[in-house]
Amino acid sequence: SYVLTQPPSVSVAPGQTARITCGGNNIGSKSVHWYQQKPGQAPVLVVYDDSDRPSGIPERFSGSNSGNTATLTISRVEAGDEADYYCQVWDSSSDHPGVFGGGTKLTVL
Amino acid sequence: EVQLVESGGGLVKPGGSLRLSCAASGFTFSSYSMNWVRQAPGKGLEWVSSISSSSSYIYYADSVKGRFTISRDNAKNSLYLQMNSLRAEDTAVYYCARARSTTGTTYWFDPWGQGTLVTVSS
């Protein structure tokens, strides 16, 4: 089955740019979706189809996907961005198509 | 407002059964695929199961296949997860989530319910 690999943690100072990666075999050929989860809350979609933002998500959140790595970029990081972030793909060739990465804890220093 | 509300969680002994429900409102439930996703305490998200809008296509994670059954009642705007032969490792918060797609070949999950906690312990 398809495997997505994320770094366990990323740290960044307020106002700087955070980049969270999601690795997978030829992931550039798939669409990648990203979720933010704060403690005690349900996940919230922040990027879908590699780089599209749902309504209500700040422009500071952006995504890219090429080769074997997809990246969620958060510009001008704020304290409120501290959360766990998960990438996800739908592997339509599989009998169990839903796949999540292991998650990345973003710490705002 | 699009809303998903899960219920049915609780404490169950190993080997026992539980049925989760997810009540949907604010959208045309019968037009969307739906999913269950779980999260063990302190762990990441794990996709569990998916059901298409008309129940024609159903998928399960290997970890639950043969023990869990997903179903839906479009007349009642409700999604279900029947969980049998429960194990300690099934302990988790279970979320229902609506599937969205623009192409029909990839799906993302939006929105999510608030989750219901299932604890499997003797």
Image (cartoon, helix red, strand yellow):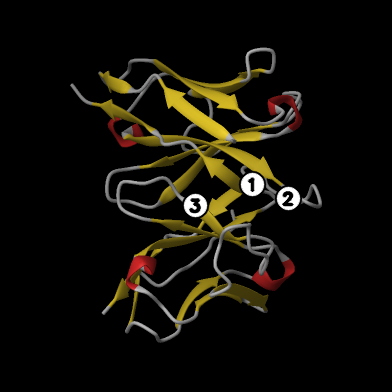
Asked if the residue at tag 1 contacts the one at tag 2, i.e. Cβ–Cβ closer than 8 Å, the answer is yes
Q: Which residue is drawn at 25% across and 18% down?
A: B13
Q: Distance between the residues labelled 3 and 2?
A: 26 Å
What secondary structure is found at the residue carrying circle 2? loop
Whether residue B2 is visible to the viewer of this picture, yes or no, is yes
Q: Is residue B94 left or right of residue B79?
A: left
Secondary structure category for the residue under label 1: loop
Considering every residue shown, the one lying at the far right of the view is B103
Residue type of the residue flagged with mark 1:
Pro
Q: Which of B45 and A64 is in front in this view?
A: A64
Q: Which mark is residue A97?
A: 1
| Residue annotated with mark 2 | A93
Name the subunit of mark 2.
A
Q: Do the residues labelled 3 and 2 touch (CB within 8 Å)?
A: no
* Secondary structure under the numbered disc 3 in the rendered image: strand
Quarter of the image with the C terminus of chain B in it: top left
Is A3 in front, or is A15? Answer: A15
| Residue type of the residue flagged with mark 3 | Val
Q: Name the residue under label 3.
A: A44
Q: Quadrant of residue B115?
A: top left
Q: Which amino acid does label 2 sit on?
A: Ser
What separation in Å lies between label 2 and label 1 (alpha carbons)? Answer: 7 Å
Question: Are discs 2 and 1 both within one chain?
Answer: yes
Compared to residue A64, the image places residue A50 above or below, namely above
User: Residue A86: x and y, percent?
Assistant: 47, 60
Residue A8 relative to residue A93: left or right = left
